[in-house]
Image (cartoon, grey):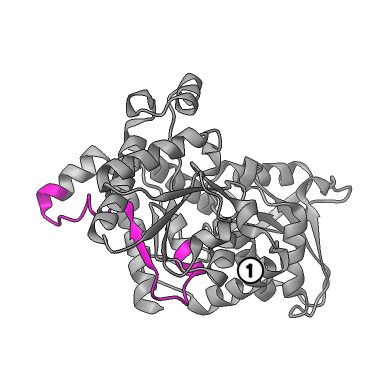
Amino acid sequence: MRYIFITSHLSTFNIALAYFKDDIIVSKLNEIYIQAVKRNALFEHFNSFHRIAKYYGNEINSNFEIKNFNALKRLDRKVDNDTKIITTRYDHELTLNTIEKLNSLGYRVKEVIEIGESYGIKPKPYSVRARLRRFLIKLNFKLFKKTKLIVKYCLSEKSFDKRLIHYSQQKLNSYFDYSASVNFLNDTLEKIDNNIDLGIQNEFNDDAVNLILLFPYLKIKSIKSINLINTKYTEDNFKIANNSNININNSCQIISKYIRDNEHIRKINLIIKLHPKNNNLGVNFFKFIKDKIRKNSYRDINVYKLNTSIIVEHFLYSFHIKNKINTVYGFGTNIISSKICLLRDKAINFILVNSEKYKKNSIKSILISYFNDRSEFLRYKHVSGLLQNIIQNE
């Protein structure tokens, strides 16, 4: 059997391998071809996929090979239908393009298996247009294509495959242990306004409170505004889309409130992870965040920029081995993957930044939230449902 994995993230590849292990025909040679989205730092190196696969190798009583998708050659014989696609989402353009490419090379896809995003999280489009598109693609599979569409998720708002998630996380942790560097913190963190160099490891000692903020993609209106952000960091010069500005303000407010409510804490460290697409935001953006929190909380804190090329789960796992994590703040599925990665430590708080905004349960407040910022509201409802499901079943 021939498998095409469409993924750009190690955790998703890990879940795909777990399904592959149960699906393969033992007596045959099984081939895996990687079709990955090369989105800057988000694309993992091909060698990483090979290393992860080795952890499964001893448990699979069969031969299998991992190759690059571009290595597929046109078939000389008649159409071959021994091909399956394992993808994060069947409605992604890359999935549909991959099916077309396979057909043009003489391969007929037997099955498309959607395993969800990150740790196998069931996708849920937030816009009406995206939901309609997904429905039409699903209908097209059912009525017009000879390809069977299958969905297998580890996590949705109603289900949680704890066994499979634990199993795949163990394999992922083994890879993180293998690839850990001696100077991990120095390689991944950059201190903002670092006037006194105490050694970065000493900054996260036992008496420090360590907070982690995971930003979603912040939409910038123009290339010119990027230059403004990188040269001046007063609030007036931030040309960021309104909903992204709201996310920034809500993040600063919720962290400032935490600081004001905990005056007894001597040292607070805030580690900020930007979306990989926002890696063009320079140090001055982080200075802006730091200044905003200082004005709201009347306290100075240490702010660190987390390298956008590092996988969030890799950082959390490696950082948590020697250091305490108090709270993780996030918006979307990044906070879900963080919760899964740190599932064993029940002392860590996981906070949805916009939870305060949607806290009121009156019909009036729900309607206002829905129509004013529908996509953000639906994302909050979806992610809070996933988080609640994990907490109830952990």
Quarter assignment of residue 60: bottom right
Of the pair 379 and 225, the residue shown nearer to us: 225
* Residue 38 visible in this rendered orientation of the protein: yes
Vertical placement of 219 versus 266: above or below? above
Q: Position of residue 367 (x, y in %)?
A: 16, 46
Residue at 63 percent of width and 71 percent of height: 173
Residue at 59 percent of width and 77 percent of height: 167
Residue at 83 percent of width and 48 percent of height: 71
Q: Is residue 172 left or right of residue 266?
A: right
Q: Position of residue 297 (x, y in %)?
A: 27, 48
Q: Which three-letter amino acid code belongs to the residue tagged 1?
A: Leu
Is residue 112 in the magenta section?
no
Q: Quadrant of the C terminus?
A: bottom left
- Which residue in the rendered view is the most extreme toward the right? 76
Q: Quadrant of the N terminus?
A: bottom right
Of the pair 114 and 174, the residue shown nearer to us: 174
Q: Position of residue 86 (x, y in %)?
A: 63, 59
* Residue 146 visible in this rendered orientation of the protein: no
Vertical placement of 148 versus 70: above or below? below
Of the pair 338 and 53, the residue shown nearer to us: 338
Vertical placement of 151 versus 6: above or below? below
Q: Position of residue 181 (x, y in %)?
A: 70, 61
Of the pair 177 and 165, the residue shown nearer to us: 177
Which residue was labeled with disc 1? Answer: 172
Is residue 361 in the magenta section?
yes
Q: Read off the magenta span.
A: 338-365
